[in-house]
Every structure is written in C-alpha cells, then in structure tokens.
Image: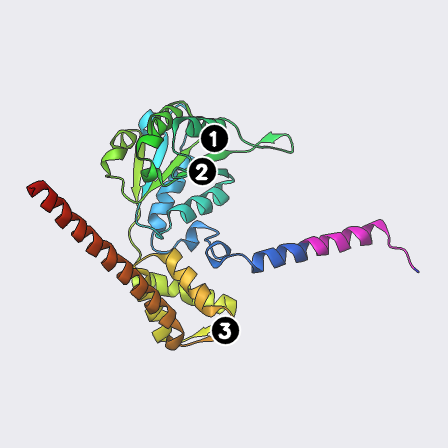
C-alpha cells in the first residue's frame, strides 16, 4: 500500500481530464471537429471573414444604427457560421447563438435575444465580451412569427453587443425591413478546388487514403456546400482507412431517392392543378 502526494493526485486528475477531452474531441462530428480555428483556416471566403473581423473590432454601442448589426449572406455550407466562430475566437468574444427558425415569434425573440444583447458572462470577476449570433433569419415567416422581425430590429437599435445575423437570401422581401439596419457581407458559393482541398486535409488528419475519383465524386455531389461534403466524407469513411470511388455509390443512390421524391411531388402537384382547373371550368 502506498500514498500519493497532493501534487501527484492533481497531475493524475489533470491527465484524466485531458483524456476525457481527447475522447470527446475524437468523437465529435467532423463538421465541428474541423471547424476553422482561425480566420486563416476559412475556406474560399477569407476576405469576407476579415471584413467581419474588422467590423467587430470597430463596433461600438454608440455607432450608427445602420452599422450595429451585420447580415452574413450566402448559400448553405459556404462558411458563414464558421467564420463567426473563428473571428470570435480570435478577438476573445463568447457567442450566444440562437436559430431564428426555432424561435421566431416576438416573445421568444425578446426573451432570448434581449437577455443576450445586454449581458456577458462573469468569469473570474470580469465581464466577458459577447456577441449575439442569430442564424437563419430568413426562416422568420408566417403568422406564427408575428412580431419576430420587428422585435429583432428593436433589439439591434438598443444593443450593447455586436449582433450577427445569417441568411441564405438577403433579398427576400420578408427581410426588407431588416436590411435597413444591417451591414451586409456576401459569402460566395465555394468552388470545387476549395472544397476538394479541405476534404484532402481532413483525410490526412484522419489517416484515411482516398482516391482522386472518390474525392471528385463527393465534391461533385455536394453542390458547393462544404458542410454537406464533410458529412458525406465522414459517412463514407466510417470503418474504412481506404476509400475508392465504389464507396461513394451511396451518394448516387441517395440522389436517386431525392429525384424520385421530387418527381412524385411534381406529379401530384400537376394532378392537383388539373383537378382544380377542371373544377373551375365546372
């Protein structure tokens, strides 16, 4: 029987903690595991991310209302949310994130967003810098979203923290009023070379060997959406250290399912229109 000193016990606990963190990290979804850690890691839209960084650095609660919030615009998987996290990490901000599609009405927006727009966490007695990220603001629509956008605009006017909104389509008519209160930064759709390079880096980190044709198939299938490409890569690589083009067949079968669903949808829509036309004639 032997006894450990206080220092040895602390060291063992630290190693246990590190081991747990390593296990958690290794089991993270690849879209999170390989999320950009810095602005330099941003794929394809680095200059836009640098523009976001400059905007946050110059942000002040006293600035013009037009500049107090920013609207990041671009197709899915082009790096909007990843850029926010990379910039926040660089500048030492904590992020309070909410999805506008999940909490769209006035009450929900007021409860969550107002609290987040005025308070940062207290860590070691110091108020931490905070920014508010509202994803998918173009998801605010319909009767159940009554007052959601007007409440968001009110929060932007009074906010003491930077507010970042994201949308796939900034020019949607429903966002007309919001555009008047936001600086707009446009993210472009990622090209195949950028996506392929990002996937190659992930394969290297994961110790996976993948053929050029297999990579090209994943890139072609994702339609410029890096997040979708990474999800597809992870799905294909499960249990494999060598991936060939034959392993990507699951992607084409999934596309066929989508095509069948779309065809059925269009078919039934056409039948419904014909039926309505017939009823109108009668």
- Category of crowding for the residue at label 1, using alpha-carbon neighbours closer than 10 angstroms: few (below 14), some (14–19), many (at least 20): some
- Which residue is at 23% across, 59% downward? 263
Q: Secondary structure at mark 1?
A: helix
Q: Which quarter of the image is occupied by the N terminus?
A: bottom right
Residue 96 coordinates in the image, percent (x, y): 49, 37
Q: Which quarter of the image is occupied by the C terminus?
A: top left
Q: Nearer the viewer, residue 232 or 266?
A: 266
The CA distance from mark 2 to mark 3 is 36 Å
**Does residue 24 lie above or below 129 as drawn?**
below
Report the residue marked by disc 3. Answer: 240
Q: Is residue 202 magenta?
A: no
- Which residue is at 49% across, 27% downward? 115
Magenta part of the chain? 2-17
Please give the label number shown on residue 112.
1
- Category of crowding for the residue at label 3, using alpha-carbon neighbours closer than 10 angstroms: few (below 14), some (14–19), many (at least 20): few
Q: Secondary structure at mark 2?
A: strand
Figure quadrant of residue 106? top left
On the question of residue 6 being in view, the answer is yes
Report the residue marked by disc 2. Answer: 98
Residue 168 coordinates in the image, percent (x, y): 30, 45
The CA distance from mark 1 to mark 3 is 43 Å
Please give the label number shown on residue 200.
none
Pick whichever of labels 2 and 3 is earlier in the sequence: 2
Left or right: 17, with 149 as reference point: right
């Amino acid at each position: 029987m032997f006894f450990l000193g206080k220092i040895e016990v602390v060291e063992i606990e630290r190693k246990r903690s590190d081991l747990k963190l390593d296990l958690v990290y290794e089991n993270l979804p690849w879209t999170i595991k390989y999320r950009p850690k810095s602005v330099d890691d941003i794929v394809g839209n680095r200059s836009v991310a640098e523009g976001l960084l400059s905007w946050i650095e110059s942000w002040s609660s006293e600035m013009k209302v037009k500049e107090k919030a920013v609207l990041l615009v671009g197709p899915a998987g082009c790096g909007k949310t990843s850029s926010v996290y990379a910039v926040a990490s660089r500048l030492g901000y904590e992020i309070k994130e909410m999805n506008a599609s999940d909490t769209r009405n006035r009450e929900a927006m007021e409860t969550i967003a107002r609290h987040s727009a005025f308070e940062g966490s207290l860590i070691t007695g110091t108020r931490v810098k905070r920014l508010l990220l509202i994803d998918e603001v173009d998801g605010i629509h319909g009767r159940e979203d009554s007052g959601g956008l007007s409440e968001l605009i009110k929060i932007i006017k009074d906010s003491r923290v930077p507010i970042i909104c994201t949308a796939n389509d900034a020019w949607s008519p429903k966002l007309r009023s919001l555009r008047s209160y936001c600086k707009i930064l446009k993210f472009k759709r990622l090209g195949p070379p950028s996506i392929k390079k990002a996937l190659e880096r992930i394969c290297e980190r994961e110790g996976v060997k993948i053929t050029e044709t297999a990579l090209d198939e994943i890139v072609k299938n994702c339609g410029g959406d890096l997040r979708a490409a990474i999800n597809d890569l992870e799905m294909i690589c499960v249990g494999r250290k060598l991936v060939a083009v034959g392993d990507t067949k699951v992607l084409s079968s999934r596309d066929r399912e989508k095509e069948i669903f779309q065809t059925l949808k269009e078919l039934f829509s056409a039948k419904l229109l014909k039926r309505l036309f017939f009823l109108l004639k009668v």
